[in-house]
Image (cartoon, rainbow, N blue to C red):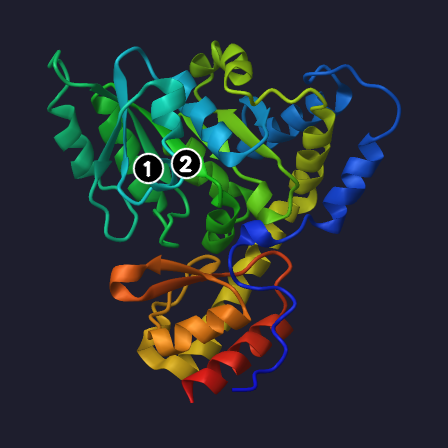
């Protein structure tokens, strides 16, 4: 079957998108003269102040190189000896980080069922039954993902309930925010939505993503509970997340946070996912899956469609047992990309 030319931007992952031109310009501006290494520079200090303003209070921000490293750093700082991490069975730290928390931190991941990717407060109570039993790893940290791997969202009340339940048992709360920008953009409340979602609810530490939303190898670990950050500055180097030329990461984040670019770019990705779902639904009906909350669509495709479609424009399978796939949009996805992809889908579906 003759298909049209594939779209310029595919739908495999927002990780596949390049860096935004504004970010490249920020790196170029920082690339003049010498600056002391490891964060002792004006760019990093300016970036740290920008995070204080974003969260509406003093926070401790440690810049990192990648998402897995940011998660390991955040969790390692929040864990005590012999403690374990409670997380969703679908969480990135459980499925897609090659056992990094277990290997690097020597911790145990306690996974709980979460069909839609969201951890329930009841799972915290279940894990807490092991507190005080010396034969069991002690649940000390709850890790949630916003937005989840299934593209679902915790409401502010959901996160508050999880934090209240965790803190009642003496546990801390980590939020893996690789796509936190998409979740905040979906809430439609601007930066206030972030503060409502993270600060007011009681989250202790956040992995604040940037790479999936137009940055170039730039992540941040933000400690709202600054007491947890005391050892983190040493741990960051131990887990290979201390960048020598940190000014280039800092300059990216300063530009990213300025004028709410982080929300604008994530909001665009969300809008493109809605457009993609709407057009796919006209072709596939209910098999297009539920309407997306953020920038991911989860259709069900028969192999006769999925295989040639993926050969033509690559995307990942998601749940092979149910023929579910994942299409993701990004800051640079265009309406033309969506229309062209759906032209190919329509041709194969016909």
User: Would you call the spot at circle 1 few (<14 residues within 10 Å), some (14-19), or many (20 or more)?
Assistant: some
Percent x, y of residue 346: 47, 84
Vertical relation: 79 (above or below) 326: above
Percent x, y of residue 122: 16, 38
Residue bearing mark 2 = 97
User: Would you call the spot at circle 2 few (<14 residues within 10 Å), some (14-19), or many (20 or more)?
Assistant: some
Q: Secondary structure at mark 1?
A: helix
Residue bearing mark 1 = 94
Vertical relation: 202 (above or below) 345: above
Tell me what residue is drawn at x 30 percent, y 48 percent: 117
Measured in 3D between alpha carbons, the distance from the residue under mark 2 to the one under mark 1, in whole angstroms, is: 7 Å
Out of 219 and 44, give the one closest to the viewer: 219
Q: Secondary structure at mark 2?
A: loop
Tell me what residue is drawn at x 35 percent, y 73 percent: 301
State the mark number for residue 198: none
- In this rendering, would 149 be left or right of 127? right
Tell me what residue is drawn at x 70 percent, y 36 percent: 252
Q: For residue 82, what is the image quadrant?
A: top left
């Amino acid at each position: 079957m003759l298909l049209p030319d594939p779209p310029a931007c595919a739908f495999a992952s927002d990780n596949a998108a390049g860096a935004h031109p504004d970010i490249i310009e920020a790196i170029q501006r920082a690339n003049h003269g010498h600056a002391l290494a490891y964060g002792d520079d004006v760019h990093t200090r300016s970036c740290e102040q920008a995070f204080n303003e974003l969260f509406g209070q003093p926070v401790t921000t440690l810049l990192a190189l990648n998402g897995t490293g940011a998660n390991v750093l955040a969790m390692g700082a929040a864990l005590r000896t012999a403690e374990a991490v409670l997380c969703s069975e679908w969480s990135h730290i459980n499925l897609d980080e090659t056992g990094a928390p277990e290997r690097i931190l020597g911790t145990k991941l306690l996974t709980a069922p979460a069909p839609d990717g969201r951890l329930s407060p009841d799972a915290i109570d279940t894990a807490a039954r092991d507190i005080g039993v010396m034969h069991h790893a002690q649940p000390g940290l709850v890790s949630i993902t916003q937005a989840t791997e299934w593209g679902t969202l915790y409401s502010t009340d959901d996160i508050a309930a999880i934090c209240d339940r965790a803190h009642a048992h003496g546990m801390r709360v980590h939020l893996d925010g690789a796509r936190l920008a998409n979740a905040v953009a979906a809430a439609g409340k601007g930066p206030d939505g972030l503060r409502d979602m993270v600060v007011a609810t009681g989250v202790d530490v956040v992995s604040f993503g940037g790479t999936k939303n137009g940055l170039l190898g730039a992540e941040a670990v933000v400690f709202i509970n600054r007491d947890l950050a005391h050892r983190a500055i040493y741990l960051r180097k131990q887990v290979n997340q201390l960048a020598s030329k940190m000014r280039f990461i800092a300059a990216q984040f300063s530009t990213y946070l300025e004028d709410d670019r982080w929300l604008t770019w994530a909001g665009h990705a969300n809008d493109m996912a809605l457009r993609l779902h709407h057009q796919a639904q006209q072709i596939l009906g209910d098999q297009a899956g539920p309407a997306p909350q953020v920038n991911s669509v989860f259709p069900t495709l028969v192999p006769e469609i999925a295989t040639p479609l993926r050969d033509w424009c690559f995307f990942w399978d998601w749940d092979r047992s149910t023929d579910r796939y994942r299409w993701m949009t990004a800051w640079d996805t265009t309406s033309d990309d969506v229309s062209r992809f759906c032209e190919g889908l329509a041709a194969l579906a016909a």
